[in-house]
Image (cartoon, rainbow, N blue to C red):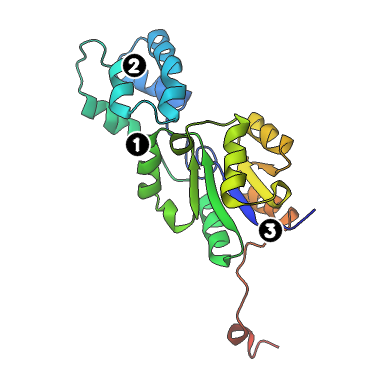
Amino acid sequence: MGKISTILWDFGGVLLTNGWDRGSRKQAAEKFNLDWDEFEDRHELLLSAFETGKVSLPEYLQRVIFYRDRSFTPADFERFFFEQSQAMPESLAILSELADTGRYFNAALNNESLELNEYRIKQFHLADYFDAFFSSCYLACRKPDPKIYRLALYITQSAAEECLFVDDRALNLECARELGMRTIQFTSASQLRADLASEGVIISPERSKSDTKGTN
């Protein structure tokens, strides 16, 4: 098995909190006094189109929330929507260390709507760490569709066995393994660091010769 050259990363549940998951939607239903079943049904019907860039955030909100008069505004709801995203600092620190080594091609492989994806990239400075973003809203397909993994391999020109994918969801990882990728299921930053090491991933940057002078 060859050395890892490419590392693909999920966002939600690994580097950041999930942006618009069931828990966030439950909080929204309580805060804005929404009928949960109706809200969730409409969300599920639009989810694929929303995360593959076919439906914008304003269109999503119109269909899911503002199809009837509300006591709050779209701006109120959008503010809550974006506030759900929070950093996972320990995981981001590992990604930063990896980026500093310059050894690996780091790329996002995530399911996310366009506006949320771009907000998270800017808000958490993810372009400082990633070489590319293979997001569902850009590629018009979502995990666990095999197409999105193949596109990541084609675009990076990486051999599957030299590609490592980090995600918190088992199904997404199963599909990657079927294509020959190596995988890590994220549970914690300490576990991630240990599993990266077991895969032969070097996290600390190499010290230059000038750094090592006088240390013997």
Q: Is residue 3 above or below residue 133?
A: below
Which residue matches tag 1? 115
Residue 171 place in picture, x, y as percent: 65, 29
Residue 64 is tagged as 2
Left or right: residue 33 compared with residue 197? left
**Amino acid found under the numbered disc labelled 1:** Glu
Which residue type does callout 3 highlight?
Val
Neighbour tally class for label 2: few under 14, some 14-19, many 20 plus, Cα within 10 Å: some
- Relative to 27, does residue 105 appear above or below in the rendering? below
Spot the residue most to the bottom. 214
Which type of secondary structure does the marked residue at label 2 adopt? helix
Report the Cα–Cα distance between label 3 and label 1: 32 Å
Amino acid, disc 2: Val
At x 44%, y 15%, the residue is 45
Sequence order check, earlier mark of 3 and 1: 1
Q: Is residue 121 left or right of residue 71?
A: right
Question: What residue did someone put label 3 on?
Answer: 201
Return the mark for residue 194.
Answer: none
Give the residue at the far right of this rendering.
Answer: 1
